[in-house]
Image (tube, rainbow, N blue to C red):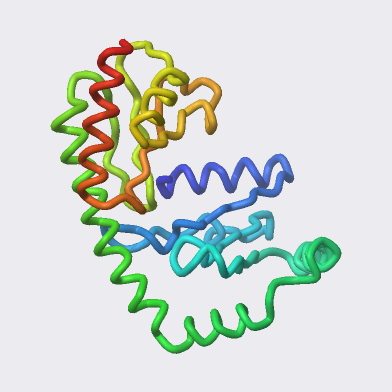
Amino acid sequence: MSEDRKRELIQISKQLSLPVIEDDAYGDLQLDGPPSSPLKAMDREGSILYVGTLSKTVSPGLRIGWVAGPEPVIERLADIKMQTDYGSSSLSQWAAAKWLSSGLYDENLSRIKVELRQRRDEALRCLETYCRGIARWEKPSGGFYIWVTFLKPLSLSALFEQALQKNILINPGTLYDKEAKYSIRLSYSYASLTELRYGIQTIAELAGKLM
């Protein structure tokens, strides 16, 4: 999100007295250039609830995240958290605190970003090779995903079923936006380079036949 768009959103939030939840799960996974500042950094009214997590950068098994906001809101959320599951594991929180304070988090993050950048760039090369002319996409500056939109109508449910038969799991765009009838969310975070090549080539072949 551009800085101008952030300022506009802050202004709308202020005018409407409407709080905003900023989910910055991928904030530390900026692959090109320095990380952009969060929306919360511009908040002077206390209207932004800033949410983060270690699930994307350390381990989803830790189940540790955080929220920054006005003290009364945090106290209420902490109370709800205790009523829901008695709080997160103290051992996991202790381990995470040690991990962050020791510098190991930053070292691990650097390694993760190198690998993610390699996978993202390979996925983009494969899209250019196999999907040029049938789809469009943009280079993501970070995170785990590439949003791919097919240029002609096709059945995403049929594409999903046919891809699944070839051991490829796709996320139809309609899971995230009901209007994204011809889009898929492509993940490059877990698959190997060989799997990425196979998956993208296969999806391109299947999609081409369905158009």
Q: List the single residue furthest toward the front.
A: 165
Figure disc tally: 0
Q: Which of the 4 image quarters holds residue 45?
A: bottom right
Where does residue 10 sit, x and y in percent of width and height?
A: 58, 48
Q: List the single residue furthest toward the left.
A: 129
Picture quarter with the N terminus: top left
The residue lying toward the viewer, choosing from 185 and 72, is 185
Q: Is 32 drawn above or below residue 78 in the view shown? A: above
The residue lying toward the viewer, choosing from 159 and 122, is 159
Picture quarter with the C terminus: top left
User: Which residue is found at the position 62% from the left and 79% from the top?
Assistant: 93
User: Which residue is found at the position 57% from the left and 70% from the top?
Assistant: 62
User: Which residue is found at the position 23% from the left and 22% from the top?
Assistant: 205
Where does residue 166 sit, x and y in percent of width and height?
A: 33, 31
Q: Is residue 182 left or right of residue 93?
A: left
The residue lying toward the viewer, choosing from 45 and 23, is 23
Q: Which of the 4 image quarters holds residue 52?
A: bottom right
The residue lying toward the viewer, choosing from 40 and 132, is 132
User: Which residue is found at the position 49% from the left and 67% from the top?
Assistant: 59
Q: Is residue 87 left or right of residue 182?
A: right
Q: Is 197 drawn above or below residue 94 in the view shown? A: above
Where does residue 106 sit, x and y in percent of width and height?
A: 37, 77
